[in-house]
Image (cartoon, rainbow, N blue to C red):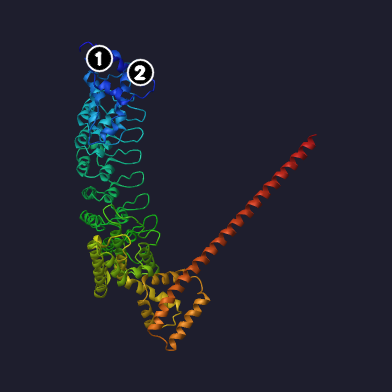
């Protein structure tokens, strides 16, 4: 190397290293002076110590982080400068002439960063090229781990050729080099590790084995095949049912990941048990049915078909630790196709319990690819469809089951109030159209909305049941771009018509109960037919809230008055309209009455409990005082006796 003769650049380099040794951060300008070195290159061993060079390399990495995130660009000027000088790191030796490996280098710093840092790591390995010295930092991360994590397959082969153990673990996480290579999805490194004796059953601190990693990551089924094909005989067979720290097997992760159908089939062919439960008692079938997805038909059909091919029977009625079966979770997540598949396969309905409101359709936000209004329409339609499928399979719904679905529709905002009804009247639509004369887009929106409402009325008369709900959903989805606007009530009118039969059916008996069963069924049906879904919902709520109380005397008197009025021959349209306007008010009043009564009872119960706790504390305090006084008297008597 040519002799160094540029004193200015040398002084700048020494000043920068001196600042680093004192804990002073240097700026980007100082590093740029080193990168743009003028004159012959120096021999760094002659002017800097090894620790100073390490600090300089580590400091240069702080300016790489923003650059690495920009289109893969890496500003590695200082690293390139050190490489150009010909500097190569050599390990220090102890008194027995063995290398000292406890040391933190720039490779450890970049190895702890997230992301793919292949270019930086590859250049740093040109400096730290002693493959027989596998430096380890305080967390147990080695240069070999960094090479596996960053995809430097040539460096990994050099380490293995130098005798590196392929099963060395990261002390802080328990991860093996095979874990890191599988997460990266690097096939050459996985092959090299397995051919040199890597253990495919070695788990990390969380119990995650390499096969768990393959099941969790995307598009690594081919790498999972390598675990079965290239593993040494001493590690065979690969444990396909090994549980992690939470009891999940690789099959649990494979069915949870939609893109891992090939992995699911591979595990089942390798002998995985489809009925093993995790720490929560959930089998893979529970995991499938608990997933909240827009496309509910997969992977349950593929999973059951794959189990049939390997002749592995699946327990359809297994219960998790909360006592819920896969069918209950499929109903709770309002997945009609899942429910239909489970019933066709023979799921038991004799002990089925409909999900309660605390875990029925609890998802409040749509998936990323779906609009909010589309999510609400799909949820409401699927909830009604699920109930129809259950009834078709032989389940007899309870009024509380229907009320759970009513609560969902109310939460989605599909129950029309009086104010919304006024908005969707023809006069209101005409007014909007007149005011939007200069806006042809707005005019077309309102005209199209009226067509949708007319189609809904026709569909309500033409079809019933599951087919009707599917037709409603398809039609609404096709026109969402025309009616999905803030404050537009016409989509609510569409679903008001769709769910009308459902509300009428389940509100008839509560309404008759409110009137003391004095009115004929025909009269009750006529009255209910003229009520809105929101009023029918309030009637059902009132009956449920008052199920453990007597009806208020005022309401009983009002019901008796209506019955007598009807029997005297004053029925007809006027009478029906009178009841239609008055009964929802009294039903709402009854609901509020029951809720307030229960609130007072809970408050009184808390007061008595608090009073009992205070009395207990007073008794304990008095007991301590008695004990203290007794001890004081005994001590005084003892001392007086001694004196």
Front in this rendered view, residue 283 or 33: 33
Q: Which residue is mark 2?
A: 18
Horizontal side, residue 358 vs residue 301: left or right: right
Residue 448 at x, y = what percent? Answer: 23, 66
Q: Residue furthest bottom?
A: 568
Horizontal side, residue 95 vs residue 513: left or right: left
Question: Is disc 2 placed on a helix, strand or loop?
Answer: helix
Horizontal side, residue 571 vs residue 549: left or right: left
Q: From the image, which quarter does the N terminus lie in?
A: top left
Front in this rendered view, residue 80 or 31: 31
- Asked which quadrant contains residue 610, the reply is bottom right
* Disc 1/disc 2 C-alpha distance (Å): 18 Å
Question: Is disc 1 placed on a helix, strand or loop?
Answer: loop
Residue 188 at x, y = what percent? Answer: 19, 35
Residue 36 at x, y = what percent? Answer: 24, 21
Between label 1 and label 2, give the one nearer the viewer: 2
Q: Which residue is mark 1?
A: 43
Where 310 falls versus 237 (above or below)?
below
Front in this rendered view, residue 588 or 231: 588
Where 452 falls versus 515 (above or below)?
above
Question: Residue 260: which numbered mark, if any?
Answer: none
Residue 580 at x, y = what percent? Answer: 40, 77
**Label 2 packing within 10 angstroms: few (<14), some (14-19), many (20+):** few
Q: Is residue 417 visible?
A: no
**Label 1 packing within 10 angstroms: few (<14), some (14-19), many (20+):** some
Q: Is residue 541 visible?
A: yes
């Amino acid at each position: 190397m040519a002799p160094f003769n540029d004193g200015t650049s040398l002084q700048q380099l020494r000043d920068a290293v001196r600042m680093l040794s004192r804990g002073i951060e240097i700026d980007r300008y100082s590093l740029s002076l080193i990168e743009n070195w003028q004159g012959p290159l120096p021999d760094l061993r002659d002017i800097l110590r090894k620790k100073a060079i390490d600090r300089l390399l580590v400091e240069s990495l702080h300016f790489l982080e923003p650059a690495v995130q920009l289109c893969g660009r890496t500003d590695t000027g200082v690293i390139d400068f050190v490489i150009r000088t010909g500097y190569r790191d050599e390990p220090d030796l102890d008194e027995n002439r063995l290398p000292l490996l406890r040391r933190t280098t720039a490779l450890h710093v970049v190895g702890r960063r997230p992301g793919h840092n292949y270019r930086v790591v590859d250049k740093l390995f040109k400096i730290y090229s002693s493959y027989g010295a596998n430096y380890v930092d305080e967390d147990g991360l080695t240069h070999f781990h960094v090479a596996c994590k960053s995809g430097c397959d040539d460096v990994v082969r050099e380490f293995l050729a130098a005798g590196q153990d392929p099963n060395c673990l990261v002390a802080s996480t328990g991860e093996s080099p095979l874990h890191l290579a599988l997460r990266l999805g690097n096939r050459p490194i996985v092959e090299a590790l397995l051919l040199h004796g890597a253990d495919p059953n070695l788990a990390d601190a969380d119990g995650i084995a390499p096969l768990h990693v393959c099941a969790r990551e995307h598009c690594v089924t081919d790498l999972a095949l390598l675990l079965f094909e290239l593993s040494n005989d001493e590690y065979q067979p690969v444990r396909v049912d090994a549980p992690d720290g939470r009891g999940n097997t690789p099959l649990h992760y494979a069915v949870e990941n939609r893109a891992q159908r090939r992995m699911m089939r591979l595990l089942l062919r390798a002998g995985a048990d489809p009925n093993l439960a995790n720490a929560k008692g959930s089998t893979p079938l529970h995991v499938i049915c608990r997933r909240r997805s827009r496309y509910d038909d997969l992977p349950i059909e593929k999973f059951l078909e794959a189990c049939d091919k390997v002749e592995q029977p699946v327990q359809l009625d297994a219960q998790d630790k909360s006592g819920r079966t896969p069918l209950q979770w499929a109903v709770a997540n309002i997945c009609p196709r899942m429910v239909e598949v489970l019933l066709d396969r023979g799921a038991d309905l004799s002990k089925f319990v409909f999900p309660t409101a605390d875990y029925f359709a609890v998802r409040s936000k749509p998936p990323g690819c779906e609009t909010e209004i589309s999510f609400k329409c799909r949820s409401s339609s699927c909830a009604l469809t699920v109930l129809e499928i259950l009834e078709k399979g032989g389940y007899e719904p309870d009024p509380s089951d229907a009320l759970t679905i009513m609560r969902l529709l109310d939460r989605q905002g599909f129950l029309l109030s009086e104010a919304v009804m006024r908005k969707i009247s023809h006069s209101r639509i005409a007014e909007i159209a007149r005011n939007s004369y200069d806006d042809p887009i707005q005019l077309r929106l309102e005209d199209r909305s009226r067509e949708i409402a007319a189609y809904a009325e026709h569909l309500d008369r033409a079809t019933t049941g599951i087919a009707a709900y599917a037709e409603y959903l398809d039609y609404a989805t096709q026109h969402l771009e025309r009616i999905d606007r803030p404050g537009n009530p016409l989509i609510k009118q569409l679903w008001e018509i769709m769910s009308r039969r459902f509300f009428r059916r389940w509100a008839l008996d509560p309404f008759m109960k409110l009137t003391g069963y004095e009115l004929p069924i025909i009269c009750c049906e006529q009255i209910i037919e003229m009520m809105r879904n929101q009023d029918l919902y309030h009637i059902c709520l009132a009956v449920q809230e008052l199920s453990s109380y007597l009806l208020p005397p005022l309401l009983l008197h009002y019901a008796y008055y209506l019955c007598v009025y009807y029997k005297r021959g004053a029925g007809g349209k006027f009478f029906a309209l009178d009841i239609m306007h008055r009964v929802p008010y009294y039903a709402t009043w009854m609901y509020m009455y029951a809720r307030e009564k229960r609130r007072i009872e809970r408050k009184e119960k808390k007061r008595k409990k608090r009073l009992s706790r205070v009395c207990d504390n007073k008794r304990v305090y008095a007991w301590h005082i008695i004990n203290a006084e007794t001890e004081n008297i005994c001590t005084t008597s003892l001392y007086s006796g001694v004196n």
